[in-house]
DNA sequence: CTAAATCGTAATAAACGAAGTTACATGAAG
DNA sequence: CTTCATGTAACTTCGTTTATTACGATTTAG
């Protein structure tokens, strides 16, 4: 099953943007996200709609973070992306009248709901600022080694 | 995103098999799983490899549950199906050398691992016997209403 | 005002995986 | 031996996601 890696991708982009604190074009972001400019605009456009970044057109245009790094969490990003489905496994739900199916669905749905709640809770606890700090820690360690 | 509903499907099939305690052919199971016989053999074959069901060829052949309903859990079924990916969201993991990516992955991986552990734990607590009992409860309630 | 750079977005193509289908081989029952 | 059912390989179909193309809209520089 193919995974949706947009959350991972926009995090990558946002941290890069946080580092250099300047406008970055879709083209530049496309390179660091291993994709192409149109896909970047499509994805970053969702973040813009959520007020997390701003975009500017024309020469010297590009993308910039518009929110407080301390306040933006992974959950905010997940929501900005349209809350894509979390699970790759799910119910069949093709015969809702079947009592067997109802019993099966009841058992599975409860477990999935709990796991989803846990995941979203974890997401809500990670801010961009924490990730940025983590990156800087790694960066310092990396420089110290070399 | 398209979901893998095989776990749901085989549960449906197994509960039907548990009800009638007789051999069921791939054709019969295909009908109650809303699919076709070849897909049933493919999927049930995985359960057979795990020792959960047996198959018999020839006239009067078919599929039968081979394990104790009290002992088989959803987790066993999940494993028998090859432990398919649980999450539809994941890391990009295309530039493992990038320190930004490492920071992002570390944050996401921890959250996913915990949610997965919770889900599998819940799966391990649901036996086929419990599901069957739940079905019978619903069945009784349904008959009482009509 | 014009030219160049950049985003915005629709339309289309390509890629991929899952499921469905066909075909035929294998084995068991009577 | 004939029939019925599974076993499995090969192929096709389908749906979704991502990539690409194309062009419009907007902004800056000179």
Image (cartoon, coloured by chain):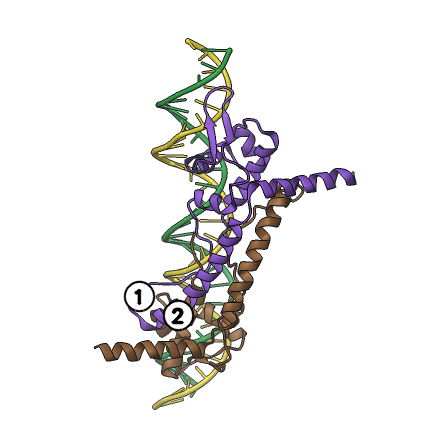
Chain colours: A brown, B purple, C green, D yellow
Instruction: Check whether the beta carbons of the residues at disc 1 and disc 2 lie within 8 A of each other.
Output: no
Sort mark 2 into few (<14), some (14-19) or many (20+) by Cα contacts within 10 Å: many
- Dot 1 or dot 2: first in sequence order is 1
Q: Which residue is mark 2?
A: B104
Q: A48 or A16, which is in the foreground?
A: A16
On the picture, is B107 further left or further right than A78?
left
Kind of element beneath mark 2: helix
Where B78 sits versus B35, above or below? below
Residue B96's mark? 1
Q: State the image coordinates of residue D16 (x, y, percent, origin top left).
A: 49, 54
Among the 4 quarters of the image, the one containing residue C26? top left
The chain that hosts pointer 1 is B
Residue B53 position in % (x across, y down): 48, 33
| Viewer can see residue A38 | no
Corner quadrant of residue A8: bottom left
Relative horizontal placement of residue C4, taking residue A130 as reference (left or right): left
The quadrant of the image that shows the C terminus of chain B is top right
Q: Residue at x 44, y 70 (%)?
A: A41
Q: Residue at x 49, y 53 (%)?
A: B120
- How far is mark 1 from mark 2, CA to CA? 11 Å
Q: For the residue labelled by badge 1, is the local secondary structure a helix, a strand or a loop?
A: loop
Q: Tell which subunit mark 2 falls on.
A: B
Q: Decide which of A66, A119 is in the foreground and name it.
A: A119
Q: Badge 1: few (under 14), some or many (20 or more) residues near its Cα, within 10 Å?
A: few
Query: Residue B144 placed where, x, y %?
Result: 77, 39
Is A32 placed left or right of A109 in the picture?
left
Kindly tell me whether residue A129 is visible in this rendering: yes
| Marks 1 and 2 on same chain | yes
How many labels, in total?
2
At x 52% / y 27%, what residue is drawn?
B25
Residue B109 vertical position relative to residue D26 in the rendered view, above or below: above
């Amino acid at each position: 099953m193919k995974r949706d890696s947009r959350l991972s991708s926009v995090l990558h982009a946002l941290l890069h943007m946080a580092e250099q604190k300047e406008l970055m074009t879709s083209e530049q972001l496309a390179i660091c996200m291993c994709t192409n400019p149109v896909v970047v605009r499509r994805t970053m456009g969702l973040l813009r709609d959520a007020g997390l970044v701003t975009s500017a057109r024309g020469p010297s245009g590009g993308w910039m973070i518009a929110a407080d790094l301390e306040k933006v969490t992974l959950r905010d990003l997940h929501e900005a992306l349209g809350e894509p489905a979390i699970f790759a496994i799910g119910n069949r739900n093709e015969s809702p009248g079947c009592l067997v199916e109802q019993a099966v669905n009841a058992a599975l749905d409860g477990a999935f709901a709990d796991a989803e709640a846990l995941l979203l809770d974890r997401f809500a606890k990670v801010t961009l600022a924490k990730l940025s700090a983590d990156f800087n820690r790694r960066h310092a360690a990396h420089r110290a080694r070399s």
